[in-house]
Image: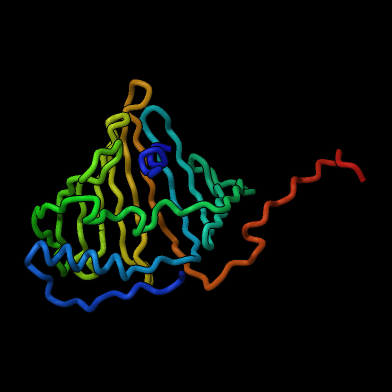
């Protein structure tokens, strides 16, 4: 996946601060943003569905359902190119970190210089947009962050990759008590053409636990040739 290439880069509820008047000072905004990241907790157990759409050099549409607990993941492919499968293809991953956590993707002042571009109205509150200047050289870098004016967590990121002149975006939002990824896009030059990819996340669930069988590898189907 393009996003996979570009982004190869404790179960407590998110404490959302009360909607107080936002600071006007950019340095104060970054301070509150840094504090919100430090206080952030990610869900250890969840299920989510996402749709993958690829266009350009290759056309593909898939719908996946993910089950995660800790670093264990069950990935079920539910539909391909609009056709829902009767028996989902299942893949089991262990010791597999989740790529789209806020903590993993959010820019940190230690790694980027935040340059204030201005406020942006978002419904009934104000968000804050900063251009990002990486402090070191890298093939992949974030270029812009929008900070939510209520939670002071990132609501949108822009990124670029020198490989294939890639560019894209990642968005986050509140779902129940958590701050989670809502979508991602990427485009890059691949094999002489432009390839595009979009991920859309939906149907988040946050169960207290999942059955241990969730991450068990299913035995192969008996086709009548096995002994016994």
Q: Quadrant of residue 56?
A: top left
Position of 204 compared to 222: left or right?
left
Percent from the top left, x then y, of residue 5?
A: 40, 38
Q: Using residue 205 as the reference point, say whether residue 184 is left or right of it.
A: left
**Which residue does the image show at 50% across and 50% down from the upper left?**
64
Outermost residue, top side: 192
Q: Residue 184: image x %, image y %?
A: 34, 48
Q: Is residue 140 left or right of residue 70?
A: left
Q: Which residue is drawn at the image coordinates 21% and 53% (left, top)?
A: 145
Q: Is residue 226 left or right of residue 43?
A: right
Above/below status of 218 relative to 210? above
190 or 78: which is nearer to us? 190
User: Quadrant location of residue 146?
Assistant: bottom left
* Of 15 and 204, the residue lying toward us: 15
Quadrant occupied by the N terminus: top left
Q: Position of residue 87 (x, y in %)?
A: 64, 48
Q: Residue 181 versus residue 72: which sits nearer the camera?
A: 72
Which residue shows up at 36% across the image and 61% down it?
180
**Position above or below: 193 against 112:** above
**Measuring 42% from the left and 74% from the top, which residue is drawn there?**
12
As drawn, 42 above or below 161: below
- The spot of residue 25 in percent (x, y) is 7, 65
Label total for image: 0
User: Which colour style is shown?
Assistant: rainbow
């Amino acid at each position: 996946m393009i996003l996979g290439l570009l982004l190869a880069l404790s179960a407590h509820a998110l404490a959302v601060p009360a909607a107080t008047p936002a600071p006007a000072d950019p340095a104060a905004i970054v301070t509150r943003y840094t504090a919100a990241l430090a206080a952030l907790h990610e869900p250890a157990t969840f299920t989510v569905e996402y749709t993958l759409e690829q266009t350009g050099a290759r056309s593909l549409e898939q719908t996946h359902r993910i089950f995660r607990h800790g670093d264990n993941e069950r990935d079920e492919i539910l539909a391909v190119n609009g056709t829902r499968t009767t028996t989902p293809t299942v893949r089991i991953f262990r010791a597999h970190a989740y790529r789209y956590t806020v903590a993993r993707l959010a820019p940190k002042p230690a790694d980027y210089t935040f340059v204030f571009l201005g406020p942006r109205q978002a419904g009934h509150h104000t968000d804050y947009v900063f251009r990002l200047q990486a402090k070191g050289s890298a093939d992949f870098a974030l270029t812009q962050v929008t900070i939510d004016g209520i939670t002071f967590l990132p609501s949108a990121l822009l990124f670029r990759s020198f490989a294939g002149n890639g560019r894209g975006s990642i968005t986050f939002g509140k779902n129940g008590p958590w701050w989670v990824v809502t979508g991602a896009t990427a485009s890059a030059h691949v094999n002489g053409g432009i390839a595009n990819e979009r991920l859309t996340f939906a149907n988040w669930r946050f169960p207290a636990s999942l059955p241990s069988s969730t991450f068990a590898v299913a035995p192969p189907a008996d086709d009548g040739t096995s002994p016994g």
